[in-house]
Amino acid sequence: MRIGAQDTIRVVENTPKVHNLIVCTLCSCYPWGILGLPPVWYKSGPYRSRAVSDPRSVLAEFGTVLDDDVEIRVWDTNSEMWYLVLPERPAGTEGWTEEQLMELVTVNSMVGVQNAKNPSELGG
């Protein structure tokens, strides 16, 4: 997806065997216009370095524990190429509308530090 003269967004999909994690190792490039203000942790040096060197531990700190056979792909975003994660569809959401599914997607799931919410996490 082309946003402006130099900005491109690539969406990477989480699957049962691949989990994607987004980071900007140089600064804190982030698609503000789509996701809003970046979380403070996203811009922090420790997140930016550890997401590359030890992504499983970073994910675990966010409560995302993956089986050992799940490949983690770390995507280094920059000012010309932004990445977003398409979270894996939660079990029990077959037949849900796009609007219902959107309630399960968070900023954290779109940068890959967490999965989409489970339906049981919705209030009401």
Image (spheres, rainbow, N blue to C red):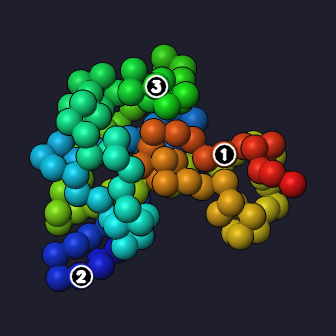
Q: From the image, which quarter does the N terminus lie in? A: bottom left
Question: Are there few (<14), some (14-19), or many (20+) residues within 10 Å of tag 3?
Answer: few
Q: Earlier in the sequence, mark 1 or mark 3?
A: 3
Q: Is residue 35 above or below residue 42?
A: below
Q: Residue at x 23, y 57 (%)?
A: 29
**Farthest bottom residue in view:** 5
Mark 2, secondary structure of its residue: loop
Which residue position is annotated with label 3?
A: 61
Near-viewer residue (21 or 120): 120
Q: Residue at x 51, y 48 (%)?
A: 109
Q: Are marks 1 and 3 in contact (CB under 8 Å)?
A: no
Q: Nearer the viewer, mark 1 or mark 3?
A: 3
The answer for how far apart the CA atoms under marks 2 and 3 are is: 34 Å
Question: Left or right of 11: which side holds 88?
Answer: right
Which residue position is annotated with label 1?
A: 117
Q: Is residue 120 visible?
A: yes
Question: Are there few (<14), some (14-19), or many (20+) residues within 10 Å of tag 2?
Answer: few
Q: Position of residue 22 (x, y in %)?
A: 34, 46
Which amino acid is tagged 2? Gly
Mark 3, secondary structure of its residue: helix
The answer for how far apart the CA atoms under marks 2 and 1 are is: 31 Å
Mark 1, secondary structure of its residue: loop
Which residue position is annotated with label 2?
A: 4
Where residue 6 sits, quadrant-wise, is: bottom left
Q: Earlier in the sequence, mark 2 or mark 1?
A: 2
Q: From the image, which quarter does the C terminus lie in? A: bottom right
Q: Residue at x 52, y 39 (%)?
A: 114
Q: Position of residue 105 (x, y in %)?
A: 60, 55
Q: Residue at x 66, y 54 (%)?
A: 104
**Farthest front residue in view:** 40
**Farthest left residue in view:** 26
